[in-house]
Each structure stands twice: as C-alpha cells, then as structure tokens.
Image (tube, rainbow, N blue to C red):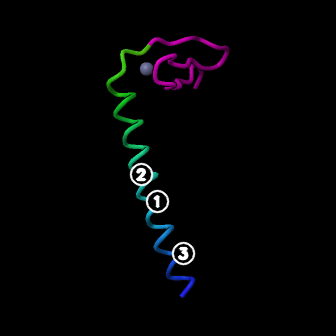
Amino acid sequence: MKAQMLEVEIKEVKEYLASLEKQLQELQENCDHHFQENTYYETCLKCNKVNSLYY
Ligand SMILES: [Zn+2]
C-alpha cells in the first residue's frame, strides 16, 4: 500500500524534524548570545536566535 508507506515516511520525517528543533533549541539555550541589532530585530551571530525589538 502506497498510502501506508507515505504515512510511515511522514512520521519518520516529523520525528527527524522534532529532533532537529530540539537540537536547535538546546543550542540556543546554551549560547552566550552575541546579538547584532537590526532595525526591528536583533540576531545572535553565534546561534542565529532572533529577538524582536518592537512588540
Ligand atoms: Zn546565541
């Protein structure tokens, strides 16, 4: 069944994506940020974390 194969693949990709997001989150939590300010936001040069400066 093609549909079942696709479902399995979708599940695997979602799990992979979740693990990547977790890795990125951990990296950004452990970073001693070095922010570079732009007009409306600041970006960390080390971990790429973005903070909005205007809410
Ligand atoms: Zn950072």
The first of marks 3 and 2 along the sequence is: 3
For disc 2, the neighbor class at 10 Å (few under 14, some 14 to 19, many from 20) is few
CA–CA distance between discs 1 and 2?
6 Å
- Tag of residue 38: none
Which residue carries the number 3 mark? Answer: 6
As helix, strand or loop, the secondary structure at mark 1 comes to helix
Q: Where is residue 36 in the image (x, y as percent from the top left)?
A: 56, 11
Which residue carries the number 2 mark? Answer: 18
Residue 15 vs 31, above or below: the answer is below
CA–CA distance between discs 1 and 3?
12 Å
Which residue carries the number 1 mark? Answer: 14
Q: Position of residue 2 (x, y in %)?
A: 57, 83
User: Disc 1 residue type?
Assistant: Lys
Nearer the observer, 39 or 35: 35
Q: What stretch is highlighted in magenta?
A: 34-55
State if disc 2 and disc 1 touch (CB < 8 Å): yes
